[in-house]
Amino acid sequence: MEKFNKQEIDEKLKAGFPMEHRWHNRFHLEMPFGLINDPNGLAFCDGKFHVFYQWNPLGCEHKNKCWAHTATRDFIHYSTPELALWPDDVHDKDGCYSGCGTVEDGQLRVLYTCNRKEDGVRIPAQRFGSLKGGQIKKEDIIVPDHPEGITGHFRDPYLFTRRGKRYFVIGAQREADETGTVLVYEETAEGWKNLGEVQTRLGEFGYMWECPNLVQFGSYDVLIFCPQGLDERAFDRQNLYQAGYIAGHLSLDSMDMMQHTKFQELDKGFDFYAPQVLTHEGRQILIGWMGMPDKDNEYPTAEMGWQYSLTMPRELRLRQGHIYSRPAREMKDLRIAETAVELEAENTTAISRTLFDGSEILLDMELGESKEIVITIAFGAEKLRFIYDLKAQVMSIDRNEMRNGGRGVRRFRLFADENLSLQIFVDKTAVEAFFQHGEEAASLLVFPEKNIQPELTVESNGRLKSLSGKIWQLDSFKFNC
Ligand code: FRU
């Protein structure tokens, strides 16, 4: 019997939308069954944004990797996701791994890694495909195996253009010392040519770099990648694996990332990995995976047959070597205007409000005498806290008072002088927070035991000079559009 029957799987999917379980998010992409991970193949074609993502339709394990597909004009109305690509030949029999999207002569094409293992040996191949009739038709393999000096950990191509020529970056592991790196390939008349490694000043930086993206911001190149094997530090690298970037100038002649910044993370939350960026009409739109490899036991929805979520789309800007991320402007259209609640207080030490079933919260505080501010999202006795220590200039996110799923604390430096500003999206389990107008972002999942309206409290150890803000109920994404 066929393992992946598109028709059957698509029918089962159709029946699964809208998703009812109280832990299913409303304005984050996810699936009624199976495990999803990396966003793939982002492209704008035929007036629509196309979003693909890794998906195991057969269970909640990291295997049977297929690509799911949905399309949207506005990031709110989506086509019902479908199975678009699945392992069905010798090259990708062990998974259709991550890859990117592109548009050629009006045709959406993808480039992905075919995962194949023979006697435990990885033989990764890079292959093009074209979206036709809801399905990716597999085309040429352009790189049949890993190059010399690189192990079988060679995957996740991301196309970019320079002076009319096409290139891709790809994640890799050096054979000599099993450290992570990124390679560049160039399209030539004779095929795709390996230009070698991108030289950086990072030195030894983990054992594998997954999911690279090369994105241009004005005259700067930003290399986004996901290093594995970095040690935790006091204010960063606190997840098992990281997702971050260096900004500089990539010379394809010297293969050098010149004058690059230090490595910075794109997100400081617990659940963020393998992001992909789509450049469209001057916008840099990022979607990330809300999850973490090798931490599956921290996500209790597996018991119900599905796992993980994608972030909302974000828009990135580069300022002085640092990426600012804000929710894509389309997310404002989710606000249900009549539900708006104004927050306005002066010389206060505490406010509290009941949230909606799906909320966006804007908070602007003039700190005044306050030295510590605690923002709590309470689900009955269970609590998620954002704690800002003004003296240390440190934000902490504390999930220890949640009963289900992953716990712990994440800490990061956040500069605040007189003002502290937060924008927090609270979906059923997905929470995304943006600090100081996008200077930092954090994605995380919480799995409240009870299905109750969350309660927001802001508490301060001294009087806040002022607090203003707004709360909206947010509408759900619509499917079958
Ligand atoms: C990152 C990753 C990629 C790989 C894919 C497989 O989460 O490990 O490197 O292509 O997931 O699902």
Image (cartoon, helix red, strand yellow):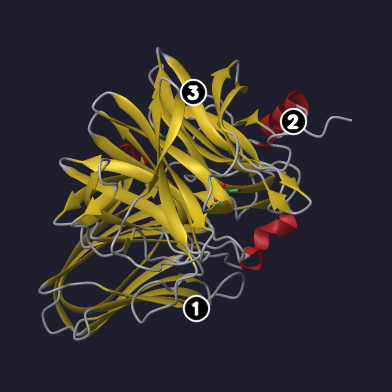
Compared to residue 257, the image places residue 476 above or below, namely above
Q: CA distance from mark 3 to mark 1?
A: 41 Å
Amino acid at dot 1: Gly
Q: Name the residue at 24% across, 56% down.
A: 438
Among the 4 quarters of the image, the one containing residue 13: top right
Q: Is 159 left or right of 451, judged from the image as shown?
A: left
Q: Secondary structure at mark 1?
A: loop
Q: Which residue is mark 2?
A: 88
User: Taking the image as drawn, is residue 289 in sight?
Assistant: no
Residue that mark 1 sits on: 408
Residue at the (33%, 40%) spot, across then down:
285
Q: Amino acid at mark 3?
A: Arg
Mark 3, Cα crowd under 10 Å, few <14 / some 14-19 / many 20+, is: many
The answer to which of 383 and 223 lies nearer the viewer is 223
Helix, strand or loop for disc 3: strand
Disc 1 packing (10 Å; few <14; some 14–19; many ≥20): few
On screen, residue 282 above or below 94: above
Q: Which residue does the image show at 66% across and 67% down from the upper left?
A: 297
